[in-house]
Amino acid sequence: MKRGGKEAQQYVWDGAIPLQIHLHDSEVTTLPPPAPALILAPRIGYLPLLSPQLKPFFSGALPPGVDTVWFDYKGLPLKWHIPTGVLFDLLCAEPERPWNLTVHFRGYPGNVLIPCDGEDSVKWSYINSLKEAAYIIHGSSKNVMNMSQPDQVDLWRSVMNGKLETHTRISSKLKLGIVGDDFSAKLNPSPLKAQHSVDETEATAASKSSRIPVRLYLWSVDEDFDDLEEEPHFDSWDQISYINRPVEINGKGKYFTLLDAVKSILPEFYPNSLNTIKSEFKNEPGIEPEEERSTGQSNIIEETSVKSIETPSLSGQPVIKLLRIQGIEPKLEIPFSWVVKNLMNPDYFLHICLYIKAPKPLDT
């Protein structure tokens, strides 16, 4: 089997999660209650995009009123702007298949979730994320802002319909190429490249400097657990720290791994790391840089600022209990360039779910 290229990306785009969706008891008006809906949800998709399938399925059991669809998992309202696969990876340390969710058509929790007007809200959330990624990579979002209307429509449809080739063709115009995957090149060297030494290849890679858009969802605990089934249940989004920091790869001859990237994102936990960088983006997904605020497109993902992780002098080293990207738990020694190229979401962000056991701070 060939590695690298488009194959790993295609696996990501084809990935899906089996859902068993129940209508909330308070909204059931029929006896017997409706059976749960069974749906295969794309990993790169978003829960509100399932509404066209769910509304007809449950319409006969709903009370009178205006439909405002939202979902919960074990009582926790699910943030609709986070990709479905990321929600699953974050909230199900021990994967649950099918994933049992509850759908609501009434009583939208506006104190927890930002408003969602269906597909249009999801589309603009995605476009704003794309703008932010472009700004991180190039320092400007103009390529995204200047997209033609047909390209914008086709790009969004490619995400909705899981069409990788279409997405690649259109997004290539945005010039958001981030980092070369030298790891895959070494696995499948061409005859012309075979004559070059590994040292020469790494020297070439070291001359590159890339900024990688990363969204990290962090759950930090001070109590250890050996079995993922023993991990405490999330009952509030306050238990999860959302960290939006770019990772800068400037090479300097060093083999840059996934662990190096994690350390650069979490200098609070790894103060002695040589790869730490400062946080530059302080908002939830969809932040619009200064140059874009005159466009009139309001940022629909503003409800929570990044939580600061104040970790003073620690009594020991942090322990990573779980790191999951696109449903995969990669080894921390894997080249970060391969992870970025093959496991990135269509919004050009790498979404990382991390459970970490943090040592207790020393008394000061």
Image (spheres, grey):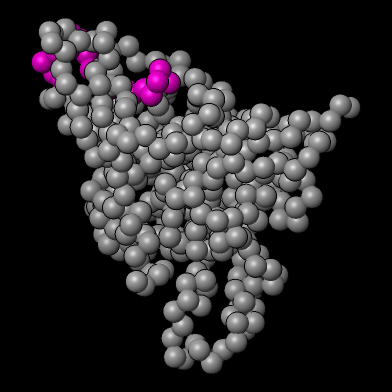
* Residue 159 horizontal/vertical position (percent): 29, 48
Q: Is residue 76 above or below residue 331?
A: above
Q: Position of residue 144 (x, y in %)?
A: 40, 52
| Residue at left offset 38%, top offset 51% | 346
Task: Give the quadrant of residue 268.
Answer: top right
Nearer to me, 237 or 158: 237
Q: Indicate left or right for 145 with 358 as reference.
A: left
How many numbered discs, if any?
A: 0
Residue 282 in view, yes or no: no
* Residue at x-position 78% and y-position 40%: 316
Residue 72 colored magenta?
A: yes
The part of the chain drawn in magenta is 58-76
Quick one: 34 or 344, which is closer to the camera? Answer: 34
Q: Please state which of residues 355 and 224 is positioned toward the viewer in this rendering.
A: 224
**The C terminus sits in image quarter:** top right
Question: Can residue 187 be seen at all in this image of the molecule?
Answer: yes
Quarter of the picture holding the N terminus: bottom left
- Is residue 180 one of those drawn in magenta? no
The spot of residue 233 in percent (x, y) is 50, 24
Q: Residue at x 31, y 41 (%)?
A: 17
Image coordinates of residue 318 in percent, x first then y, are 70, 41
Q: Residue furthest front?
A: 226
Left or right: where 144 falls relative to 105: right
**Which residue sits at x=27%, y=38%?**
18
Quadrant in which residue 168 is drawn: bottom left
* Quarter of the figure with residue 356: top right
Q: Is residue 326 above or below residue 50?
A: below
